[in-house]
Image: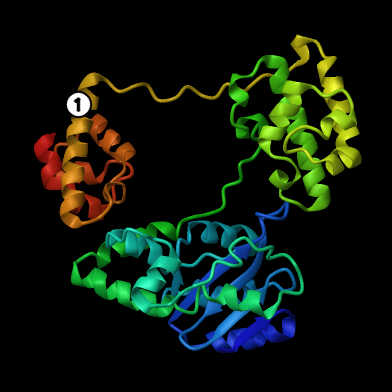
Amino acid sequence: MTIRLISDADSLGELQEGLTGENRVAVDLEAAGFHRYSDRVCLLQVSTAGQHFVVDTLAVDPSGVLRGPMESPTVTILLHGGDYDLRLLDRDLDLHPVKLFDTQTAAALLGEPSLGLAALLQKYLDVHVSKKYQRADWAQRPLPAEMLDYAVSDTRHLHELARILIERLEAVGRISWAEEESTLMEALRWNSTGDVDPVTRIKGARNLELRDVALVREAWLWRDEVARARDRAPFRVAGDPALLEVVGERPRNVSALGRIRGFSSQLAERSGKELLDRLEQTDRLDDSELVGYPRGPAGPRRPSPEVEEIANRLKAVRNEVAVTLGIDRGVLMSNTVILEIAQVNPSSVEELAGVPGVRRWQSEALADRFLGVL
């Protein structure tokens, strides 16, 4: 198998030539969020039925070449579990595929018990994919040939896997289900978390006292600055439990800081004094100057006993139909959507199909039984 590495403007022409005339292209991305501060796209793998390309997106911008085929209504883009990939394509490359087929979604609609790509490739193609580089640092350069080969393993077999899954979907009358789910995926875009208070990201911070919340927030901000400066994932600088323990133990010097579990002595020596100084400054503030845990908007009110009773009856029907169809109950319909149906209490197929979150294929599969309950 020949892998063509696209790493400069001159080689982009080779990629463009390779994609010309293709009506089905497999795509996958590699980011470095497990190792680096930023999770930006580091590699983009593209496979046609007979050619395999790896684009070094840290060295070259392929969006101009890829926009034509990826945003063409006549070219199917094959993905596996592509939700996050589609968001990264939007954020980093401004690319928005308009005709998708996701093999993970297809497998879920067929009732496959294991939805991972490796499991599906082994079952259907007897292909064994190594997990050696599953958590590799894809931002490192140069990338060894073995890592490039691993990267392409996620796209090289998608064409054949998609063909098999499409045949099975057609055989059981569910190809329209997959098409509807694919259409919904096409609208996925990157949503920034915006100005989210960092303490809301730390498990256990909600129950802390006012002063401790302020100290945890300062520790988080310190860690974020260190991580950004070193281009390391924040949890690799110090985990959330370590930050909580620093606030709880309140070490008074760098030596004591280095003895905190999950807080390396090297980190304490290099950057610990700044952390201790910032915590001390925060601790000097009056309570009136401290910012506690943010109060979010009021959550949804608990449904009435009558609505809960209807929802439970709908869930029972959903579960029975899921068994009959041989798919996971959550794939058939989530409990959240069922509760919404119980609250709306539709009296017709049209009203049921109009409930927020209800797919057309779900309405077709469940409408008669649901309306009988309602």
User: In the picture, residue 270 is in which quadrant?
Assistant: top right
Q: Position of residue 368 (x, y in %)?
A: 11, 46
Q: Position of residue 156 (x, y in %)?
A: 49, 79
User: In the picture, residue 110 is in which quadrant?
Assistant: bottom left
Q: Position of residue 69 (x, y in %)?
A: 51, 77
Question: Residue at 90% across / 39% down in the picture?
Answer: 269
**Residue 262 sits above or below residue 145 on the image:** above
Three-letter code for the amino acid on which mark 1 is drawn:
Glu
**Number of other residues with Cα within 10 Å of mark 1, as a class: few under 14, some 14 to 19, many 20 or more:** some
Q: Quadrant of the N terminus?
A: bottom right
Residue 90 is left or right of residue 266, and the answer is left
For this rendering, which residue is in front, 220 or 189?
A: 220
Q: Position of residue 198 (x, y in %)?
A: 67, 33
Residue 262 is left or right of residue 171, and the answer is right
| Tag 1 secondary structure | helix
For this rendering, which residue is in front, 237 or 181?
A: 237
**Residue 244 sits above or below residue 83 on the image:** above
Number of disc labels: 1
Question: Residue at 30% across / 73% down in the picture?
Answer: 166
Q: Quadrant of the C terminus?
A: top left
Question: Residue at 33% across / 44% down in the picture?
Answer: 357
Residue 157 is left or right of residue 252, and the answer is left
- The colour scheme of the drawn protein is rainbow
Residue position marked by numbered label 1 in the rendering: 309
Observer able to see residue 75: no
Residue 315 is left or right of residue 84, and the answer is left
Observer able to see residue 70: yes
